[in-house]
Image (tube, rainbow, N blue to C red):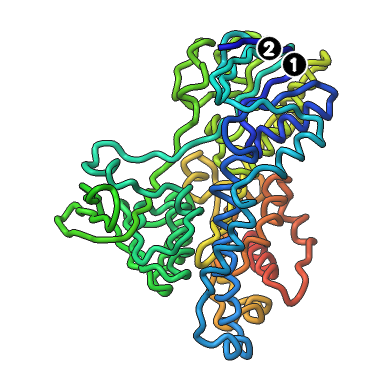
């Protein structure tokens, strides 16, 4: 084994979107920065999550929208999706699982790359083990940022689970073939999105949910409308179901799921979408007094708490603030600005909405679930606002009642809710469900993050006839 030592201003562990953005910001500030990555540069989002999953789901939505407009549905007829073409397009959006383009971006941006598995080896020190067994020791003058993301979690204690070789998000977004029968375990975002995608591509999909509803962290009506949409698409949706064991001979061929009531369900593949855990088990946390495998607790500047010297940062999924790619990139911008300010001896502005405070993680993190129908949400739900002790009112409106929605799709079905703060007269949260609502979300995010008073929003006139007219109806409800 050979060893060498190199000094940088900033070391970033993980070259996903979060790590790339931390490095981009620190390089822009004149700090020599290196990224350490053992897998593909671009991370989970680029190859096994956001991009390939949305490439699978966009054709589903496009076909649904075509069939919802008279004159177009007749042209489309009963033809389904061309699965081979959809999968080929998916492959292109995942860059065919090659990172040449992302590596080129690093080079052009001035970010250095070290391939290998990086572990903390002390204060501002990282040891990198290469594929050939060689070791490089990197030291940082100013900061180390852990941006290693999260990994799928499989439940423990389920007999036969490991031997069944279940799909996780990686196999679900990257499969080269359409399984004839797919069982999906879990009613969260990955579960409902992949159920919608593979059903539209021709799979017989059974969605098994332990609880009583889908998307439990969103407004209840969101899960109800998604459940209706999935059933209409032909998904066999079952609630209150436990999987007690799995059987798969020799790890290949059909897999049998033994359900809690003794029923046996056979599928060609089974997807477990049952949560995420941080990728921190083997990044050297014990070298700085932290416990391997834990989420990394940070303050609003994304500085890791419990480590002296303000040199260790954690951004993205790994800090558990908001497991969303766009929030990770947002945290990366905050982290980069914080590292640069400290490196130059400047005071931080960590006040709410300050330049060095990731305030939006708590108050205004937007999310879109690209299922059937789409769900878009930002800020607090009614339940979370009430549990926080706030005096609020929910204002609901059927989106299909506005002219723009009826033009968008015949028989448009959807619902919108805003959570209105009765004391401050601002909107704390919004949830929209229906075709095309993803593109309405940023207006809600601006209203929530900007804490725009209702009396001022009243003068933000939605264009006619658009789906955004639902905002006028919601504001009327807020104003009473």
Quadrant where the C terminus sits is: bottom right
Quarter occupied by residue 239? bottom left
Please say if the residues under marks 1 and 2 sit with CB atoms less than 8 Å apart: yes
Using the image as rendered, state which of residue 104 and residue 63 is in the foreground: 104
> Can you give x and y, in whole percent of width and height, for residue 453 in the image?
73, 50
Using the image as rendered, state which of residue 479 and residue 203 is in the foreground: 203
> Can you give x and y, in whole percent of width and height, for residue 206 in the image?
33, 63
Q: Residue at x 82, y 36 (%)?
A: 108
SS under mark 1: strand
Quarter occupied by residue 125? top right
> Can you give x and y, in whole percent of width and height, for residue 139 in the image?
68, 12
The residue wearing badge 1 is 8
The residue wearing badge 2 is 139
SS under mark 2: strand
Question: What distance separates the C-alpha of mark 1 from that of mark 2?
Answer: 6 Å
Q: Which residue is drawn at 29% across and 52% down?
A: 252
């Amino acid at each position: 084994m050979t060893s060498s030592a190199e000094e940088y201003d900033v070391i970033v562990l993980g070259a996903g979107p979060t790590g790339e953005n931390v490095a981009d910001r620190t390089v822009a500030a004149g700090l020599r920065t290196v990224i350490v990555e053992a897998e593909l540069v671009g991370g989970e989002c680029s190859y096994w999550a956001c991009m390939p999953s949305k490439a699978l789901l966009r054709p589903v939505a496009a076909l649904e929208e075509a069939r919802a407009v008279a004159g177009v549905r007749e042209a489309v007829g009963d033809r389904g999706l061309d699965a081979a073409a959809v999968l080929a397009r998916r492959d292109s959006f995942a860059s065919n699982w090659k990172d040449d383009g992302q590596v080129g971006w690093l080079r052009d941006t001035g970010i250095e790359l070290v391939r290998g598995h990086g572990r903390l080896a002390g204060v501002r020190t990282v040891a990198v083990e290469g594929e050939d067994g060689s070791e490089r020791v990197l030291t940082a003058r100013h900061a180390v940022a852990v941006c290693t993301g999260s990994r799928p979690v499989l439940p423990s204690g389920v007999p036969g689970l490991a031997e069944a070789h279940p799909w996780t998000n990686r196999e679900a977004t990257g499969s080269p073939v359409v399984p004839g029968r797919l069982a999906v375990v879990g009613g969260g975002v990955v579960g409902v999105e992949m159920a919608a995608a593979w059903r539209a591509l021709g799979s017989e999909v059974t969605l098994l949910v332990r609880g009583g509803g889908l998307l439990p962290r969103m407004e209840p009506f969101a899960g109800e409308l998604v459940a209706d949409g999935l059933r209409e698409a032909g998904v066999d949706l079952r609630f209150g179901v436990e999987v007690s064991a799995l059987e798969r001979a020799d790890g290949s061929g059909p897999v049998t799921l033994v359900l809690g009531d003794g029923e046996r369900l056979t599928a060609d593949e089974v997807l477990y979408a049952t949560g995420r855990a941080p990728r921190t088990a083997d990044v050297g946390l014990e070298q700085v007094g932290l416990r391997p495998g834990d989420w990394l607790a940070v303050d609003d500047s994304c500085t890791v708490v419990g480590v002296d010297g303000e040199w260790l940062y954690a951004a993205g999924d790994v800090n558990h603030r908001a497991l969303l790619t766009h929030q990770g990139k947002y945290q990366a911008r905050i982290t980069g600005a914080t590292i640069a300010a400290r490196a130059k001896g400047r005071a931080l502005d960590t006040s709410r909405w300050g330049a060095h405070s990731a305030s939006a993680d708590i108050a205004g993190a937007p999310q879109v679930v690209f299922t059937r129908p789409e769900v878009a949400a930002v800020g607090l739900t009614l339940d979370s606002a009430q549990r926080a002790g706030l005096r609020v009112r929910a204002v609901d409106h059927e989106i299909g009642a506005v002219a723009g929605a009826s033009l968008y799709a015949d028989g448009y079905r959807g619902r919108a809710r805003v959570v209105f703060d009765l004391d401050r007269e601002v909107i704390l949260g919004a949830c929209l469900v229906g075709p095309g609502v993803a593109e309405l979300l940023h207006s809600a995010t601006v209203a929530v993050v900007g804490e725009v008073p209702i009396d001022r929003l009243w003068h933000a006139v939605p264009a006619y006839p658009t789906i955004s007219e639902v905002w006028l109806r919601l504001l009327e409800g807020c104003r009473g």
